[in-house]
Amino acid sequence: MGKNRSPNGERLVVDEVSMMGSCLFENLFDWASKGKKHAQLILSGDFLQLPPVNDRFFFQASSFYQFAKNAVMVRLTEVKR
């Protein structure tokens, strides 16, 4: 949701985001955007994995542009296991 959020605010981490559909993203973005503190959505995943079932990709959601303009993208390039 942006880097200027309160450190005491809520955070929601979504792994395997490639499987999240646009409907779920709209609901999560709406939840995170409301309230006094705003919550951070932390999305993680590989888009070469499984797509969402019976829905469009989350980045096709109408609220994705608003989310993306405040997002910080980090690209992980080293495999650690």
Image (spheres, rainbow, N blue to C red):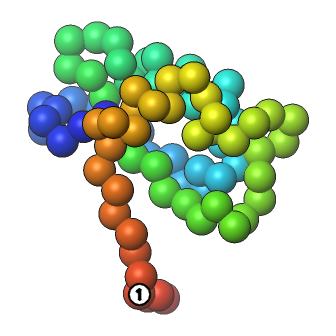
Residue 60: x and y, percent?
A: 64, 35
Q: Quadrant of residue 6 in the image?
A: top left
Q: Quadrant of residue 57 in the image?
A: top right
Q: Which residue is mark 1?
A: 78
Residue 61: x and y, percent?
A: 61, 28
In the shown orientation, is residue 75 left or right of residue 22?
left
Report the front residue among 12 and 45.
45
**Who's the residue at 72% across and 65% down the image?**
49
On screen, 28 above or below 60?
above
Report the front residue among 31 and 68.
68
On screen, 62 above or below 1?
above
**Who's the residue at 77% across and 45% down the image?**
52
Report the number of discs. Answer: 1
Can residue 8 be seen here? The reply is no
In what element is the residue under mark 1? loop
Q: Amino acid at mark 1?
A: Glu
- Which of the image's four quarters has the N terminus? top left
